Amino acid sequence: MISYFQAVVIGLLQGVTELFPISSLGHSVLVPAWLGWNTLVSAQSADESFYLAFVVALHVATALALLVYFREDWIRIIGAFFRTLRTRRIETADERMAWLLVVATIPVGITGLVFEHTLRTLFAKPLAAAIFLTVNGLILFGGEQLRRRVAAGKRSEGRTLDTLELKEGVAVGVAQVGALFAGVSRSGITMVGGLLRGLDHEDAARFSFLLATPVILAAGVYKVPDLAGPLGNGVRGQALAGAVCAGLAAFVSVRFLVRYFETRTLLPFAAYCLIVGALSVIRFA
């Protein structure tokens, strides 16, 4: 099973790496592998296991932390969504954001339901996660380089979120599908998608965090029967401890990152992924 110490470590890890653009799924595979927690490593890619039930609580806690942090945004966005249903028009920035989130969530929602189990059992293993973490570093680095070229060509300060078209929201949502591979970061790949459409880092990060909230929450709630059922036997206490740690870590992380991306870029995270990914490839090859 999983000890309370392991639960706390994995919970803190989930809360941080879900939002930092360095892949929570990749780290949930690699960190236990580096620490020699082989039971958790093998459970990650099993068809059904206690570890998957445990992870449910961490996802729900992370999503709740995001909801709390962006609560004012979500109140406006949800109100705007229902207003568009009544008026059948998109007129305000909040109304556009509501529908951007809807159309961007659909691709990963459908793909996740169909392929998540297969991709997890095939690729949620140390060597594969190390390779995809390295790929994630290349995506972040390449995204920054392409953004600079686009910005230099247009000589502009960047677009704002309320200028994105719905089809561009779909494109960012499709990019999010890459996070189903252990090692590819959901927040990182969606930020790159936003940057390549002219958003600055602050708006790209905000859109990424708002977009992650319903996806993470839905994934957690969808799997709640695992935690409530036989797979949760013996791990519910550990799941609660891990969830508290994940929620607190996620809240602190999103608060830090929102400020960080006001003035800084993805390059430090790209370097981290390339270095840790390469070392992990060497270690687990």
Image: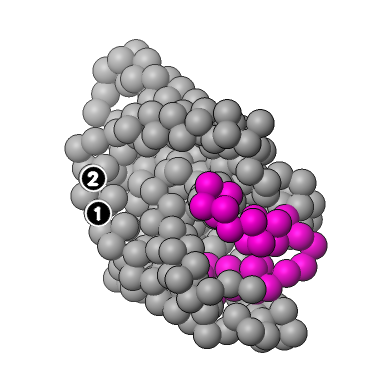
Residue position for label 1: 256
Determine whether the residue tagged by mark 1 lies in a helix, strand or loop: helix
Task: Please say if 275 is above or below 2.
Answer: above
For residue 2, side relative to residue 82 (left or right) = right
Q: Is residue 40 magenta?
A: yes
Residue 270 in percent (x, y) is at 41, 31
Q: Is the residue under label 2 in contact with that under label 1 (CB below 8 Å)?
A: yes
In this view, 279 is above or below 187 = above
Asked whether residue 225 is in view, the answer is no
Q: Residues within 10 Å of mark 1 (few under 14, many from 20)?
A: few
Residue nearest the viewer, comparing 146 with 271:
271
Residue hosting label 2: 260
Residue span colored magenta: 32-59
Q: Residue at x 73, y 69 (%)?
A: 49
- Comparing 199 with 22, the one in front is 22
Q: Main secondary structure of the magenta part?
A: helix
Residue type pointed to by label 1: Phe
Q: Quadrant of the C terminus?
A: top right
Is 256 on the left-hand or right-hand side of 97?
Answer: left
Locate residue 245 relative to residue 37 in the image: left or right. Answer: left
Picture residue at 46% right of the left edge, 35% below the top: 276
**68 w.r.t. 18: above or below:** below
| Quarter of the view holding residue 13 | bottom left
Q: State whether residue 266 is above or below residue 111.
A: above
Residue shown at the point (26%, 59%) measured from the top left: 255
Q: Few, some or many C-alpha atoms within 10 Å of disc 2 (few <14, some 14-19, many ≥20)?
A: some
Q: Where residue 196 sits: x, y (%)?
A: 44, 29
> Measuring 58% from the left and 28% from the top, which residue is drawn there?
282
Q: Give me the C-alpha separation between circle 1 and circle 2.
A: 6 Å
Locate residue 92, reporting x and y percent.
36, 57
